[in-house]
Amino acid sequence: MIELDYTLRTVALGAAVLGLSSGSLGSFAVLRGQSLLGDAISHAALPGVALAFLLTGSKAPLVLVVGAGLAGWVGTLAVMSVVGRSRVPYDAALGIVLSVFFGLGVVLLTFIQSRPDASQAGLDTFLFGQAAALVGRDVVTMAALGAVALLAMGVFWKEFKLLLFDPDFAAVQGFPARALDVGLTTLLVIAIVIGLQTVGVVLMSALIVAPAAAARQWTDRLWGVVVLAGVFGALSGAAGAVISSAGAGIPTGPTIVLVATAVVMLSLAFAPRRGLVAAWLRGRRNRRVLRVAGTLEDLYTLALGHQNPHHPHAAAALRTMTARPESVEPTLLALEAQGLVEPQSDAWALTARGLSEARRLARQSDLEDA
């Protein structure tokens, strides 16, 4: 039981570290419209893992991460080179690099697995991840590399922010835009390669995109998106690890991705400004306000036909003036609660306050028409 608790703590901590770094740095990729770059980098890193093992014979986490990072970085530079030196669009370049590097990685892994020695066992876990295999030194490696990447992001925050929102202005002001672009991409490569053992190359892009997409629903501030994305990523990683440990045979990597997806769905639904529920409530409130204003103006239009502006009119007359006659009575009751109309027998009349408000709405409507 003690060993199980230690394993769970190790996996949960490693997944949280991964979520924190990938979520924070992934915010820049998402806000730059380069969400698929994470997918390309993660797939491009696979041959680097295989080559690192072939050249060194070591399965040490740091060795494999360095190989994955170099391959991912080369793949990213290949995308930039293809886009900059040809007419191939960005998404097509991503697809080309992703396919070529991933195919090369699968071929190399197949070759390694065909070797007679058993030392290569476990490399195929980089395809789909095997978080349960994490040990203490793996977490230390992930934390150290993630901390370096986050520290570099903090040091160059102003430059990365300028590159994100106005790269042309950054170049005009003398900032090395190309170098900053490569530097930011390098930090993203680091965030991706440290998570390959946990969730694998196939699912790693989800941890780059999902936390940032969720955070974007809650705030318009860059620092807020980065912080929230890191928090969402860390919570998704830890929660996914705990949930996967609750049942036998539940894979940790896919569970982490599913938790991150759930966070995105909840954010899309319930974020206070951008959420679907908030948008529905705003739309409902706006429609109610428009119905109230429309009924008030209709009553004022009828009152203009009489010398007394407070002359009462039946609700039936108001129902003929709207596309939703069934809403007239509830709207009149709402107007009465606001002190804008008052019932008189079976009719309704404007109060002094209601007459003043109706005249204001009429003047506003005339100005908009003009």
Image: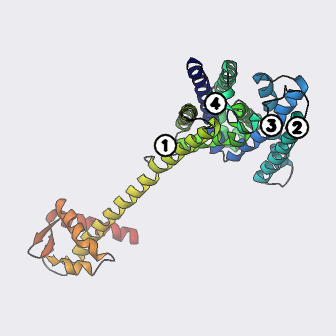
Category of crowding for the residue at label 1, using alpha-carbon neighbours closer than 10 angstroms: few (below 14), some (14–19), many (at least 20): some
Q: CA distance from mark 1 to mark 3?
A: 34 Å
Q: Residue at x 74, y 37 (%)?
A: 181
Residue 304 visible from this viewpoint: no
Name above or below for residue 159 compared with residue 336: above
Q: Earlier in the sequence, mark 4 or mark 3?
A: 4
Q: CA distance from mark 2 to mark 3?
A: 9 Å
Q: Secondary structure at mark 4?
A: helix
> Is label 2 or label 1 in front?
2
Q: Amino acid at mark 1?
A: Trp
Q: Secondary structure at mark 2?
A: helix
Residue labelled with disc 1:
218
Residue labelled with disc 4:
18
Residue labelled with disc 3:
46
Q: Amino acid at mark 2?
A: Leu
In this rendering, would 350 be left or right of 85?
left
Q: Secondary structure at mark 3?
A: helix
Q: Residue at x 56, y 17 (%)?
A: 2
> Is label 1 or label 3 in front?
3
Image quadrant occupied by the N terminus: top right
Q: Residue 229: give x, y in percent of width and height.
A: 56, 37
